[in-house]
Image (spheres, rainbow, N blue to C red):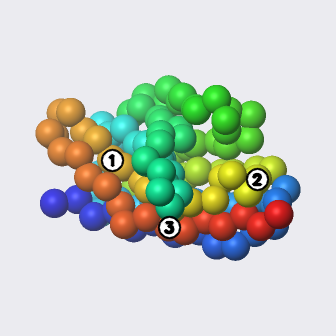
Amino acid sequence: QVQLVESGGGLVQAGGSLKLSCEASTDITTSAFTWSRQSPGNQRDLVASITDIGTVKYADAVADRFIISRDNSKKTAYLQMYNLKPEDTGVYYCRIVDYRKDYDYWGQGTQVTVSA
């Protein structure tokens, strides 16, 4: 079982920034990460992803404001969020996927609230 510990969420005013972290309990060298978010009454939507070799993808709504990254030495993935908007509010979930090691786990989520 791989544990993911997310941190960095909080309350911020519109236009502000936050950096989310997702620390894994195991080596992440061959793993991919995603960040997804879910607001009340809505489905969980993919926000950003990063492969084991660092290829990144973003949802259109955040492509010019969010940056996903990773630090294998710290077993951690990050989501740097700039120019936050009220519609970015939600619970942000980290996910680790490793096809070589055959596992797929979600973190517990961290709340991000953006006030107008």
- Residue 96, disc: 1
Q: Is residue 98 left or right of residue 49?
A: left
Q: Amino acid at mark 2?
A: Lys
- Classify mark 2: helix, strand or loop: loop
Q: Is residue 76 visible?
A: no
| Percent coordinates x, y for residue 5 in the rendering | 39, 67
Q: Of label 3 and label 2, which has the lower sequence position?
A: 2
> Dot 3 corresponds to which residue?
110
Which residue is label 2 attached to? 85
The image quarter in which residue 103 lies: top left
Inspect the image, locate mark 1, and give the three-letter code of the amino acid beneath it: Ile
User: Are the two marked residues, 2 and 1, in contact with CB atoms closer than 8 angstroms?
Assistant: no
Does residue 9 appear in this view? Answer: yes
Q: Position of residue 56 (x, y in %)?
A: 53, 30
Do the residues under discs 3 and 2 have CB atoms within 8 angstroms? no
Residue 100: image quadrant is top left
Q: Nearer the viewer, residue 73 or 102?
A: 102
Could you tell me which quadrant the C terminus lies in? bottom right
